Amino acid sequence: MWPDWGLFFEFEPDLKEGIAVSKNGLTRREFVWASAGLAAAGTASKAMGSANTAADAHVHVWEKHELEFTCEREYASAYTDATVWVDLTGPGFNKRVYGFWDGGKSFKVRVAATAPGVWHWRSGSDPNDPGLSGKSGAFTAAAWTEQEKQENPLSRGFLRPSANRHALETADGTPFFVVGDTWWGLGTNRFKWYDDNTERPMGPTAGFKDYVRYRKAQGYNWVNMIAAWPNWETDGLPWHIVTPDGITVRSAWLEYGANSAKNMDNEGGRPFQFPGKVPGYENVFADVDRLNPEYFKYIDRKIDYLNANGFVPFIEVSRRDASVLWKKYHKWPESYARFIQYIWARYQANNTVLSPIHLDVISESVTVPDFMQAINLVMKKYGPPPFGTLLSANANPSTLANWGEDSWVTLHQVGNKREHEYYWYMTEIFNETHSKPGINGESYYAGYKDARDVNYSHGAPGGTDKDDMYVRSSMYGNFLSGGLGGYVYGAEGIWSGDIEPTAPTKMWESFQWKSGAQMQHLKTFVYSIGNRYQDLEPNAGLVFPNQTHNGLTYEGWAFAARTRDKNIFLAYFENGCPAGLVRGAKTMSQYHARWFDPRRGTWQDAGSGVLEANNTGEIKLPDTPGDLDWGLSLVYQGPAPIPDHF
């Protein structure tokens, strides 16, 4: 158990300066550093394995196994000056796996067995260090039981593309459809950690584990997060700071009630140390070459907890608004590449998807070629993640548009262009020559407003029926436009981690909106045709009518996809789009036809339950069962009776 820090420090807010100050005279920053020191003094790292352990360890396949080393040399900066690795061999595997500095003299390498059997490793370092190099050991990996695989699908292995490279599956070939949520601030105190497992209701006392339990019960299996925020703190300065010569210091999210940036620290402090190197902003922008491992140790336990509960974290190393000063005052691309590799090495043995940058807009940021310098350096020096971890990035409008064809991206995303006219970018990804799976990673946020200076005007108030309907348009429209990898939900209050008393929407309120619960029905719709959803090909032209002239909305359009053999159609009609006809069916054939209610996740027959395609392959559809939006399934049953004449 961690100490109750309230016994040590008590805060009084200095509203005039916008900085919390303890009665002991400590600022908030000084407090979190002091707390981290107390935690480190009272807690030992719980490793699954140790380089100092003589006996073989026993682990499961696809389970994180940690090797810990203690350096003997003295380093001015262990983070920048020393590299450790192990050469790992096992059944069908022979790779170098890099590790990371974990504070003091501690270095760790995290590995995962990709197959049952005996695994051997031997360590090395640069520079050569007797405490890091020349160590060796072995461990035995066992398979999970079928019951264990049922209890946690992630025991089936890391994610990979399906055989046709349009969808996702686990390493054993089991389909995996992303049902995700957007928790960018997951690693911070906004998602409060409790050591106990007491279940707390949705409200101000709810914590990280409560949110995981809540979403798990609704069928979620994925969350988005950003690992580090080197320039955000509620420090009495504006949330948006630009230097006199026009360089962005930060473009943060608003801390309600303070008109400053949100705090993005945790019990370990902040991800990097202060003072920084930016003249005049030494206490705003950290020294990103002096890393604070304590911050990341508190993230580790959340990543482990997510994996244990069947969630894949999508981890982005940093947000683009830190990149301009990072490049100007630190050695680029080496400094940024080092941090990419640090995060990837730290979480490469967890079941994750990794990203080098959160590129929500290409503004107040270095350029894509600048980021490519750092990414290419990582690939050249360390190689891609050793256990096959997929690589992706938050995008605007898509990773294909941002990074190009045949890039480092192995899981495509669309995002940040939200209305239905932008679902096309998912179809473009689907039709790429060298196919890669795609998901919508940042879609229409339920209740989206963003009170900084965005004030989004195409949405609806959160928690209303209209807002729920807009979310469903994004869910089903993106899936049927080619997003066979899955879909990530987001909601006002959650995406930005709003817990402030004056926040217009607290995140525990938006967790309870119906739209979030209705995500589980998307999975019902998808799996209604079994694994064949992976064979769908998007084509909105299969339904007519399918568009109005208004692209910046979520009403009036229809979307469809069909298997190439014409045996299966899935379609979705937004509110206001009439169900006219389906074309491209097998001529003179019969289809089992059902309407899908995306509000309840239930099916009912369309008409008599059997619809016929005519001699041109057109199927006249009956009216939908009611107003609003509806899904449709057509499954081939066989030839229709041949009439005497046409």
Image (cartoon, grey):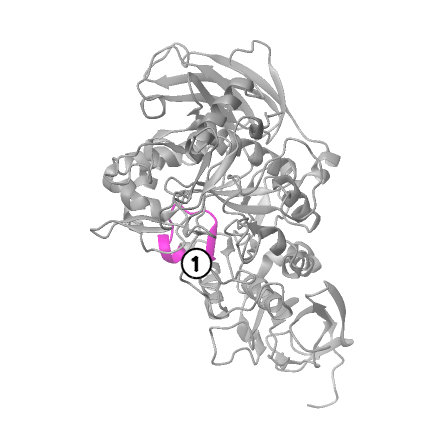
Answer above or below: position of 87 versus 336.
above
The boundaries of the magenta stretch are 400-414
Answer above or below: position of 51 versus 597.
above
Answer above or below: position of 487 versus 140.
below
Q: Residue furthest right?
A: 608
Identify which amino acid the numbered label 1 is placed on: Glu
Q: Quadrant of the N terminus?
A: top right
| Towards the viewer: 236 or 593 | 236
Q: Secondary structure at mark 1?
A: loop
Q: Quadrant of the C terminus?
A: bottom right
411 magenta-colored: yes
The reply to whether residue 501 is visible in this rendering is yes
Q: For mark 1, what is the residue?
A: 432
Q: Percent x, y for residue 367?
A: 29, 51
The reply to whether residue 380 is visible in this rendering is no
Q: Percent x, y for residue 71?
A: 40, 13
Left or right: residue 633 versus residue 551 is right
Q: Percent x, y for residue 214?
A: 68, 47
Residue at the image position 67 percent from the left and 31 percent from the top: 196
Mark 1: few/some/many CA within 10 Å (<14, 14-19, 20+) = few
Q: Percent x, y for residue 234?
A: 42, 44
